[in-house]
Image (cartoon, rainbow, N blue to C red):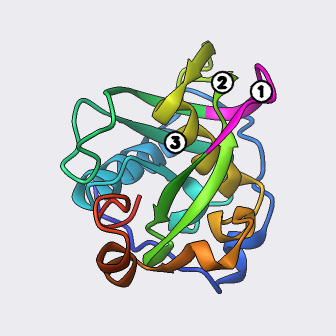
Amino acid sequence: MPIRPVIRMGDPRLLKIAQPVLEFNNPVLYNVISDMQDTMIALNGAGLAAPQIGIDLQIVIFGFLSNPRYPNAGAVPYTVLINPILTPIEDVMDSEWEGCLSVPGMRGLVPRFSYLRYQGYDINGHEIDRTVSGFHARVVQHECDHLQGILYPMRIQNMRDFGYTEELSNALPGSVDQDDD
């Protein structure tokens, strides 16, 4: 399947609330997810949301065994998550540097819930229900924000913690991962 262009911040499609998927296990859904997989892999992403490739549906994919852009992140199981529901397990939050394929070349320090339960469906309509923490929880929250029209810069608490990856890496060596999510 083709690699799709990723739309960037400023495109109004990224600010919309995505529509729920109503039909599972069909060729159209398979093609969308295949295109998302090919795009995420080609860009070495940790995840991708359907709105990032201009598809107005509540679909996110994420996961990797290892990722050279995130050498300190543990493996995250490859997941197709449709119509997700996120529930924080507790109020504990931590802030880490994030990037995004829709905000290329930039990073920001973003607070996220440390422990999370996510529910939804796989491509065949089977239920998914997982409790996760750490980078796995962060990736899920980042991708699911796209389904609500939220980009990570909207979550940054102090705009001094937002900038171009190269400049941040020079100013804060070792604390900012390279490239984008």
Q: Earlier in the sequence, mark 3 or mark 2?
A: 2
The residue at the point 42 percent across, 77 percent down is 104
Is there any visible trace of residue 121 in the rendered image? yes
In three-dimensional space, the C-alpha distance between marks 2 and 1, rounded to whole angstroms, equals 6 Å
Q: Secondary structure at mark 2?
A: strand
Q: Secondary structure at mark 3?
A: helix
- Taking depth in this image into account, of 45 and 166 the one nearest to the observer is 166
Q: Earlier in the sequence, mark 2 or mark 1?
A: 1
Q: Can you say whether 79 is above or below 178 in the image?
A: above
Q: Earlier in the sequence, mark 1 or mark 3?
A: 1
Q: Can you say whether 126 is above or below 6 in the image?
A: above
Q: Position of residue 107 (x, y in %)?
A: 48, 70
Mark 1 Cα-neighbour bin, 10 Å: few <14, some 14–19, many ≥20: some
The mark lying in front, picked from 3 and 2, is 2
Instruction: Residue type at mark 3: give it.
Output: Val
Decide whether residue 84 is among the magenta residues. yes
Decide whether residue 133 is among the magenta residues. no
Mark 2 Cα-neighbour bin, 10 Å: few <14, some 14–19, many ≥20: many
Residue on which disc 2 sits? 115
Instruction: Residue type at mark 2: give it.
Output: Tyr
Q: Residue 139: which numbered mark, if any? A: 3
Range of the magenta residues? 82-94
Q: Can you say whether 38 is above or below 165 in the image?
A: above
- Taking depth in this image into account, of 157 and 129 the one nearest to the observer is 157
Mark 3 Cα-neighbour bin, 10 Å: few <14, some 14–19, many ≥20: many
Residue on which disc 1 sits? 88
